[in-house]
Image (cartoon, rainbow, N blue to C red):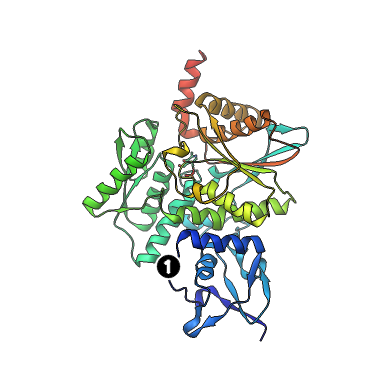
Amino acid sequence: MVVRMVGLEDVRCEGKPSLKEILGRAAQVLWEGGVTAQRLREGNVLEDVVLCHAARMLGLRRIPVGDRGFVPLEHLGFYDDVSPKAMKVFSSTLELLYRGWPTPLVRLQSLGGSGVRVWAKLESYNPFSNSVKDRIGWYMVEKWISEHGSTPSMVYEATSTNTGIALAAMAAVKGFRVKLFIPKTIQKASDTLLWAMGADVVRTDKSLTVEMIDDVKAEAEKTGAIHINQFENDANFEVHLRYTAKELELQLRSEGILPQAIIGGVGTSGHMSAIAFYFKNRFRGGIRVYGVQPAPGHTIPGIRRVETGMKWIHLVEFDGIVDIGFEEAVEHVLEIARRDGILVGLSSGAVAAGFKKLLERGEVDEGDYVLVFPDHGFKYVEQLERYRRSRGEG
Ligand code: PLP
């Protein structure tokens, strides 16, 4: 026997390796672009315990088993996660979410020029929160349910709104309640949006720091609620590795694009850490990845400064972190709205400003650049209004 394929669901993964160990093995699989034939022990236990967990995290459907041979990812069901429904008819709102992917990748005319092409990945095309956070709301809850064999009755979470809406949508569909803790600095409209979605909202004096997250953890413990915790829950990183990064690769591949760099904002650091991990390992060097954070003293909803504490960014390699001020973020929202006709959120404006900053620094050569735009601009009317007044235009 040389090699045979065994379904990953028929294989048992023993032990509990650390995230670092699993990522080490996942990096190797992405880097090699496939898996070498494996040995199965009695009871269908995969001998390579860490590979077993890494294969699950990457979303492989099959594992090659045998004495020798190497099987590329394409044959292991690696890309099965991304299978859009062409006619867009869905059996439920949840299916609308995960079979509605990939979110669009669109070329912008407001940025780029002279050999530089800029592509925006529009996460506002997610159906619940119109943001990147639908992905983690879905995956954190589904993983919790599959690991515990039951649905939670009450979920607590600290959020700047988007994760809150995504969790409220999951609560509506699955039948549980959510209580959301939101910093006072976040736009007032969030209270109404979350109320409409059926969630309870508590405003806090603290910003989204480790301290505030600890408070929510303590509150949840007191009342027996589940603290789903997007800041530390590895399902956050995993869903972006398994879906967001993978679908972006397929989109780029379909157009024959090998990007020079990918740029995005960091809040929990979930989506950009997974994208960095994926592209750095899948494409042996070459693709640069940048994070964008608010400049000191500035508030941009959804993104935070790295030093406020984030988990996954420290496990992967970034080529730089760019500081952006609130006004710069708004100015880029306006530029994109007025030249491309789409109203993106403030963190998307910050990402666009981050790209411009790299251009000014001479870090942008000819080629293709991908900007990840986390959400839509409609939620930020209050901030846009304040900016408008400050400019004497309102
Ligand atoms: N932008 C917006 C509008 C967000 O809501 C968030 C997260 O809350 C981010 C960016 C950052 O995403 P991540 O938490 O994956 O780093």
Horizontal side, residue 334 vs residue 148: left or right: right
In the displayed structure, 260 sits above or below 81; it is above
Q: Which residue is mark 1?
A: 16
Label 1 secondary element: loop
Q: Residue at x 57, y 78 (%)?
A: 6
Residue 11, given in percent of the width and then of the height, sits at: 50, 77
In this view, the residue in front, 20 or 137, is 20
Disc 1 crowd, CA 10 A, few/some/many (<14, 14-19, 20+): few
The residue under label 1 is which amino acid type?
Lys
Farthest residue to the top: give it. 392
Q: Quadrant of residue 158?
A: top left
- Looking at the picture, does residue 343 appear above or below residue 84? above
- Name the side, left or right, on which 131 lies relative to 120: left
Where is residue 103 shown, x and y percent of the image?
59, 49
> Which one is in front, 88 or 142?
142
- Which residue occupies 50% across, 62% down? 21
Q: Residue at x 53, y 65 (%)?
A: 54
Residue lying at the far left of the rendered structure? 222
User: Considering the image in quadrants, where does the N terminus appear?
Assistant: bottom right
